[in-house]
């Protein structure tokens, strides 16, 4: 039996459960075992299993019936109107962030202090290790982006970023749960290049890399019709 690695959490458990579903262990409409049964089978605790089930329910694969349990509803994530609205809202937020962060990255490259750069690198390192759960990934990613904006020395840009970050957090978490997309080394390397440009005081490159990253994220959110989304923002 395949088990979840000890350091893995709910998103890995959700993927393993989905693999079992797609291998045909349960038929559409069939009731699944409870958390206390599935958890030990996948090598995770009850709370982690509950979160994994919630993720698959958010994708339309599982459905909860009050007092009856969890039932299999579909074999693949469902693209519905709610997901479309969510995708549109995130795209609008990303467009605003694109304007803010591309300018902030250029200013951060020109103005950052040693303390600013230390905070940015600390946030980058944290982002690399916080991959266990989707909320932790989103929060660590946001902290890195904010540290760069703060290094711009412009409090208005930081205030604007905080406004969009607060509005986008729950939406990004929902989108990542719908897609089941894991954090990737490539995505981390994209952020490392932005940080390196800031550290090198190359405002033009820092701005261009930030713009390219957020543009690609926005385009993926708008253009992916299969319910997927990039790992981070």
Image (spheres, rainbow, N blue to C red):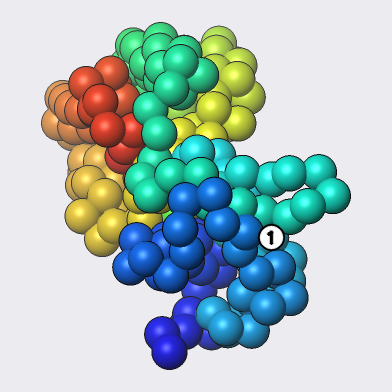
Task: Give percent across and percent down for residue 206.
Answer: 22, 32
Please state if 48 lies on the left or on the right of 6 as rendered. right
**Label 1 neighbourhood size at 10 Å, few (<14), some (14-19), many (20+)?**
some
Work out whether 88 lies above or below 226: above
Find numbered disc 1 in the image and state the secondary structure of the residue it sits on. helix
Picture quarter containing residue 169?
Answer: top right
Work out whether 77 lies above or below 9: above
Task: Give percent across and percent down for residue 204.
Answer: 15, 25
Name the residue at 53% across, 35% down.
174
Name the residue at 25% across, 41% down.
194
Work out whether 59 lies above or below 209: below
Name the residue at 62% across, 75% down.
38
How many numbered circles are shown?
1
* In the foreground, 100 or 182: 182
Picture quarter containing residue 165?
Answer: top right
Residue 73 visible to an observer of this rendering: yes
Read off the residue under disc 1.
Answer: 50
In the rendered image, the residue lying farthest to the bottom is 1
Quarter of the image with the C terminus is: top left
* In the foreground, 92 or 214: 92
Residue 196 visible to an observer of this rendering: no
* In the foreground, 213 or 192: 213
């Amino acid at each position: 039996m395949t088990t979840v690695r000890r350091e893995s959490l709910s998103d890995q458990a959700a993927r393993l459960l989905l693999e079992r579903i797609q291998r045909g262990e349960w038929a559409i409409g069939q009731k699944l075992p409870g958390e206390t049964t599935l958890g030990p089978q996948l090598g995770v605790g009850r709370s982690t299993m509950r979160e994994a089930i919630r993720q698959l329910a958010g994708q339309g694969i599982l459905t909860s019936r009050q007092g009856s349990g969890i039932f299999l509803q579909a074999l693949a994530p469902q693209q519905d109107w709610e997901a479309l609205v969510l995708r549109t809202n995130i795209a609008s937020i990303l467009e605003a962030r694109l304007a803010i962060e591309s300018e902030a990255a250029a200013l951060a490259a020109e103005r950052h202090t040693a303390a600013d750069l230390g905070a940015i690198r600390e946030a980058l390192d944290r982002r690399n290790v916080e991959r266990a759960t989707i909320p932790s990934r989103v929060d660590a990613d946001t902290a890195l982006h904010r540290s760069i904006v703060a290094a711009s020395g412009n409090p208005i840009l930081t205030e604007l970023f905080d406004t969009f970050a607060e509005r986008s957090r729950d939406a990004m978490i929902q989108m990542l749960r719908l897609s089941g997309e894991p954090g990737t080394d490539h995505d981390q390397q994209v952020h490392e290049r932005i940080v390196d440009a800031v550290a090198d005081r190359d405002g033009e490159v820092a701005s261009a890399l930030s713009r390219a990253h957020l543009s690609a994220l926005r385009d993926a959110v708008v253009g992916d019709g299969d319910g997927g989304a990039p790992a981070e923002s």
